[in-house]
Image (spheres, helix red, strand yellow):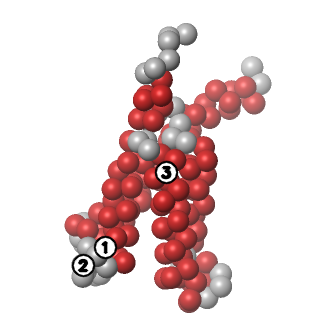
C-alpha cells in the first residue's frame, strides 16, 4: 500500500480531528467572553456590543463546529468574523500579523474558510445526517 493510498484513507478522519480541535479552542474564546471562564481582565459590557456578538458567534458557532453540525455555513460565518476581528482589532496596530498580534485571527480565518469548502469530515453530525438516507453498501 502506498503512502498516498494510506493518507487518502485517513483524510476524512484527520479533517474531523482538525475541526474538533479548532472548534474546542475557538469555543473557549466565546466562553471567556460570555461566562468569564476562564477568568479574564476584559469584562463584557453588553451582549449587543461587538464583543458580545463575537462571543455569541464564537461560543455557539464553536459548539456547532465541535459536533460538526452545519459545518460549511457556520465555518463560513466564523471565517468572516475572524477577518473582521483582524482588520478591526489587529491591523490598525501594524501591517504584519506577528507585529500586531493577529496571527491567531489569521489562522482561524483561513482554517474556517477551508472547513467551509471541505466540510466536517467523517466524524461529524453532517456526515451522519447525509448517510442516513443512503443504502448500506
Quadrant showing the N terminus = top right
Q: Are marks 3 and 1 in contact (CB under 8 Å)?
A: no
Q: Point out residue 106 in the picture as x, y percentages from the top left corner.
A: 58, 68
Q: Can you see residue 28?
A: no
Instruction: Please tell me which of labels 2 and 3 falls first in the chain.
Output: 2
Of badges 2 and 3, the one in the foreground is: 3
Q: Point out residue 83 in the picture as x, y percentages from the top left corner.
A: 55, 71
Quadrant in the rendering for residue 97: bottom right
Q: Secondary structure at mark 2?
A: loop
Distance in Å between CA atoms under marks 3 and 1: 21 Å
Residue at mark 2: 46
Residue at mark 3: 73
Q: Are marks 2 and 3 in contact (CB under 8 Å)?
A: no
Q: Is residue 81 left or right of residue 44?
A: right
Is 21 or 61 nearer to us in this picture?
Answer: 61
Q: Residue at x 24, y 78 (%)?
A: 46
The numbered disc on residue 52 is 1
Q: Is 56 above or below relative to 89?
A: above
Q: Secondary structure at mark 1?
A: helix
The numbered disc on residue 60 is none
Q: Residue at x 56, y 49 (%)?
A: 115
Q: Is 116 above or below relative to 49?
A: above
Instruction: Please tell me which of labels 2 and 1 falls first in the chain.
Output: 2
Is 99 or 51 nearer to us in this picture?
Answer: 51
What residue occupies the far front of the structure in this picture?
133
Q: Residue at x 37, y 62 (%)?
A: 57
Is 55 or 103 nearer to us in this picture?
Answer: 55
Circle 3 packing at 10 Å, graded few (<14), some (14-19), many (20+), is: some
Q: Can you see residue 135?
A: yes
Amino acid at each position: 500500500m502506498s503512502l498516498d493510498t494510506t493518507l487518502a484513507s485517513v483524510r476524512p478522519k484527520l479533517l474531523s480531528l482538525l475541526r474538533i480541535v479548532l472548534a474546542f479552542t475557538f469555543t473557549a474564546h466565546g466562553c471567556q467572553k460570555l461566562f468569564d471562564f476562564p477568568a479574564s481582565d476584559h469584562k463584557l459590557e453588553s451582549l449587543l456590543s461587538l464583543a458580545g456578538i463575537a462571543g455569541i458567534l464564537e461560543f455557539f458557532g464553536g459548539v456547532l463546529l465541535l459536533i460538526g453540525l452545519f459545518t460549511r455555513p457556520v465555518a463560513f460565518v466564523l471565517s468572516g468574523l475572524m477577518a473582521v476581528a483582524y482588520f478591526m482589532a489587529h491591523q490598525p496596530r501594524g501591517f504584519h500579523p506577528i507585529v500586531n498580534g493577529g496571527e491567531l485571527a489569521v489562522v482561524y480565518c483561513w482554517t474556517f474558510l477551508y472547513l467551509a469548502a471541505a466540510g466536517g469530515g467523517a466524524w461529524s453530525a453532517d456526515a451522519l445526517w447525509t448517510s442516513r438516507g443512503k443504502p448500506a453498501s
